[in-house]
Image: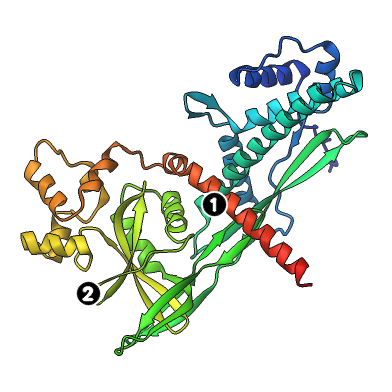
Amino acid sequence: MAKSKSRKKTPPPQHSKKEYFKKVFEAATNMQLNVNDFCKEERELLFHTRPKLHQVVNPDKNISPTKLNLFKRLINELNSKTRTTEGVSFRTIDFLYVFALFNAKLIYLVNQFPNEEKENKKLYSEQEETLNVFYNCYASDIFCAIIRYSNPTKAYYTADVEENYVNQYNQSLELTPKMNSIPIRKKQLKTKDQIRTIYQMGKMQAGNQFEWISVYYQSHDSEKNYKSQKLNLFIQAHAIKRMSERLDIIDEQSINFSLWKNTCDNIEIIQHKNTLLTPVKIYDINIGYFVIEPINDMLIIKTFLFITHNCTPEGDKLKELTGLGKSDISYWKIDRLSTFMNLNEEKHPQLMQLFTDVGMQELTQLKDKDFDIDSIQDANLDKLKEYLNNSIKYKNAKEEDVVIHA
């Protein structure tokens, strides 16, 4: 039997100079930068010192190849996605192209005109600012990707970007995003002769940081003595299932994002009758509540109630005004987001007035919104970037504290 010849691996195709210049100059033109004065030497520098943006890697080998490839595709898509802010369209990758342009220009000017310190300093400042904007957008793209697939019942993901400067002059930036998987934490809880599995809630942060969420909860006894304690946040799978059923026009990735968005910061706890609730919002509009219960050192999310359900402030008021019970609300399907999105306001003015009377008028604002994951994340992009920046400051503060007390 003839031996099969081993095939040589074909090296990946390299960007031609012409193709690369086109991308850089298009990005610069879109940002209203003048590139007409770029000389031949600067173009050579532009190509040979171009930044290298590597595909995401998983050094700990705890993410399946299929999932890792999914993240690679998604991050590339987000990097190349066109967004518009204040009338200006841009892509994340465009800021890296413009940084490359500033970098080549700066190297050329420093070599040719070393005494032009003022002009060179100005260009360096613009280069640094552009790189910071790129990092901000790039980190947000990666964070958007890992949030979509982070779920307390499956896995959490974290990421960071390794930065190196290569070539003999340390003038070419090389970036490698690194991703890691955080195993879930679960335990069995026995309540009312039932055993339920509960999952600990966590939150991803910038710089490969991850924290298990804890919530300050203030309880009081019959004598009105208040006691504040920090409880670990857990959730039942039942709550996620109910959330998916009631928010029936939202896909799994959007549910994962909403779980993170509504628990990553200090959550608001309200007491309605004998039930503890925390509001759940989409587009900053209240669409329901998590029912929570403190048990030992845990705060457990037991289920999700749509805003029309009994045992919510709005739902109980709706029942008071109309007499609608739990079975009526389910029968008429007014316990689902899709019903409100398909409601014709002109045909049902009295119904719309009823929803206003019970405090649910903001739901009508959601009719103009899109509920795909891209739209939901884009609407929260500024807040997400702020969250990442704050988590970096928090990380730096902790590191400084360790150094001071070492």
Task: Examine the rendering and report whether any part of residue 129 can be seen.
Answer: yes
Element under disc 2: loop
Classify residue 90 as left or right of residue 251.
Answer: right
Question: Could you say which is closer to the camera, residue 57 or residue 139?
Answer: 139
Amino acid type assigned to the residue bearing label 1 in the image: Tyr
Q: Which residue is mark 2?
A: 273
Across and down, in percent, residue 198 comes to 45, 74
Q: Earlier in the sequence, mark 2 or mark 1?
A: 2
For the question of whether residue 62 can be seen, the reply is no
Q: CA distance from mark 2 to mark 1?
A: 34 Å
Residue drawn at (31%, 62%), measured in percent from left and top?
A: 289
Outermost residue, bottom side: 223
State the quadrant of the N terminus: top right
Q: Residues within 10 Å of mark 1 (few under 14, many from 20)?
A: some
Q: Is residue 130 above or below residue 221?
A: above
Above-or-below relation of 392 to 347: below
Residue 403 drawn above or below residue 138: below
Circle 2: residue type:
Lys
Furthest residue to the front? 118
Which quadrant would the C terminus be assigned to in this image? bottom right
User: Which residue is identified by label 1?
Assistant: 387
Q: Residue at x 21, y 64 (%)?
A: 313
Q: Position of residue 141 (x, y in %)?
A: 58, 42
Q: Quadrant of residue 272?
A: bottom left
* SS at badge 1: helix
Residue 193, how many percent across, how many down?
A: 33, 87
Quarter of the image for residue 123 reads top right
Q: Residue furthest right?
A: 168
Viewer-side residue, 402 vs 39: 402
